[in-house]
């Protein structure tokens, strides 16, 4: 089979696995938790970045076991669970071009639907491999700690870039890293675990930077722009703008001192951030992260599959910095 066809077949298996995990073709709309999970997970607009990553990592080590599909499904379920919770935390109203689960069903359904996806992911892994399960649990714990740290630094425009990267690594990089670790565990190649984990973590930070950039450029068609300003999240472009322009820092601080901002105020501040010319610098910083990720791969970057991994990661992060849905 052609490499492209193998890839398509793998992603097809992931889609069928997700569908059957979420009640199959005939799921009842009366089961609100499943209906909510299907709305997010099967409603279109998802890039399936984590399943793709699991497969590309798996190719690098020649993994053939069907358990790789389970790892990919689990990664997507954990990611989906985290988004259901994140939209409650951020009071996010739109995702992937549709109202969020919390907007449509309320916070209680969103949180519990996320819990259901998470338990489904971990149960699936526990039926495959104990170490996959343990490492996934460690990842979920790390994501959770990073998510609360992000809430704690809300409104802090003096946050260091290191702290910002730590939050991004915990929220996004740890699960990307797990995708690599899972492939290495299934391949039985312990020396690849650390390198793949490090690569995934740095790519995850780059990916999160891309998400921050799209928030100010308005290039995510699935969400309205400037949500980070509205939620007082010190994103990369906001921190860069605050350091570059003391007057803009004062305006942001003043606006963030109030409990809520009008949409007009958010738009005005967002436009000022965009006009401060920070997007190029943010893209440069993101590229530095991607280069560091490639360095972390070491000898694996040299193989033909390693080159595929690097190419995919660059395309994903840089591509979505300019356009795309999360
Ligand atoms: C999106 O970030 C959110 C994440 C990458 C992870 C959030 C993690 C938690 C809420 C911890 C709970 C974890 C689990 C597994 C249940 P964002 O708000 O920057 O991106 P967005 O613009 O897409 O909302
Ligand atoms: Mg969010």
Image (spheres, grey):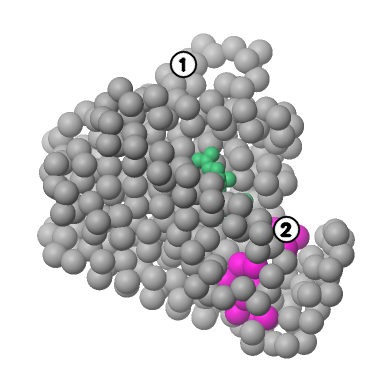
Residue shown at 14% from the left, 58% from the top: 304
**On the image, numbered disc 1 is attached to which residue?**
24
Q: Is mark 2 within 8 Å of ligand 2?
A: yes
Picture residue at 52% right of the left edge, 33% below the top: 41
Residue 286 seen: yes
Q: How many marks?
A: 2
Determine which of the numbered discs, if any, sits on residue 231 in the image: 2
Q: Is residue 218 visible?
A: no
Category of crowding for the residue at label 2, using alpha-carbon neighbours closer than 10 angstroms: few (below 14), some (14–19), many (at least 20):
many
CA–CA distance in space, label 2 to label 1: 36 Å
Which residue is at the front of the view, 58 or 5? 58
Frontmost of labels 2 and 1 is 2
**Quadrant of residue 255 within the rendered picture:** bottom right
User: Vertically, is 256 above or below 2?
Assistant: below
Magenta stretch in the rendered image = 227-242
The answer to whether the beta carbon of the residue marked 1 is less than 8 Å from any atom of ligand 1 is no
């Amino acid at each position: 089979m052609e490499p492209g066809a193998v890839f398509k077949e793998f992603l097809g298996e992931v889609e069928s696995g997700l569908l059957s995990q979420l009640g199959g073709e005939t799921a009842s709309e009366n089961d609100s938790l499943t209906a909510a999970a299907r709305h997010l997970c099967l409603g279109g607009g998802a890039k399936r970045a984590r399943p793709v990553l699991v497969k590309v990592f798996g190719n690098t080590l020649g993994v053939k076991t069907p358990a790789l599909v389970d790892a990919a499904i689990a990664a997507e379920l954990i990611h989906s669970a985290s988004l259901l919770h994140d939209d409650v935390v951020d009071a996010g109203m739109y995702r992937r071009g549709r109202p969020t689960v919390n907007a449509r069903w309320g916070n209680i359904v969103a949180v519990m639907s996320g819990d259901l996806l998470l338990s489904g992911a971990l149960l699936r892994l526990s039926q495959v491999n104990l170490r996959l399960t343990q490492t996934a649990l460690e990842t979920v714990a790390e994501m959770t700690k990073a998510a609360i740290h992000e809430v704690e630094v809300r409104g802090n425009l003096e946050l260091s870039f290191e702290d910002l990267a730590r939050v991004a690594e915990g929220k996004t990089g740890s699960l990307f890293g797990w995708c690599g670790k899972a492939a290495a565990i299934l391949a039985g190649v312990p020396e690849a675990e650390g390198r793949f984990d490090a690569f995934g973590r740095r790519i995850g930070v780059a990916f999160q930077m891309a998400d921050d950039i799209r928030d100010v450029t308005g290039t995510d068609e699935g969400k309205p722009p400037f949500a980070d300003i509205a939620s007082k999240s010190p994103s990369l472009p906001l921190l860069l703008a605050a350091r570059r322009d003391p007057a803009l820092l004062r305006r942001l601080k003043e606006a963030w001192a109030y409990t809520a901002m009008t949409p007009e105020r958010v738009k005005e501040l967002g436009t000022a951030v965009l006009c401060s010319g920070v997007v190029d610098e943010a893209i440069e910083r993101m590229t530095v992260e991607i280069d560091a990720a490639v360095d972390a791969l070491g000898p694996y970057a040299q193989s033909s599959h390693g080159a595929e991994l690097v190419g995919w990661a660059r395309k994903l992060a840089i591509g979505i910095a300019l356009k795309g849905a999360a």
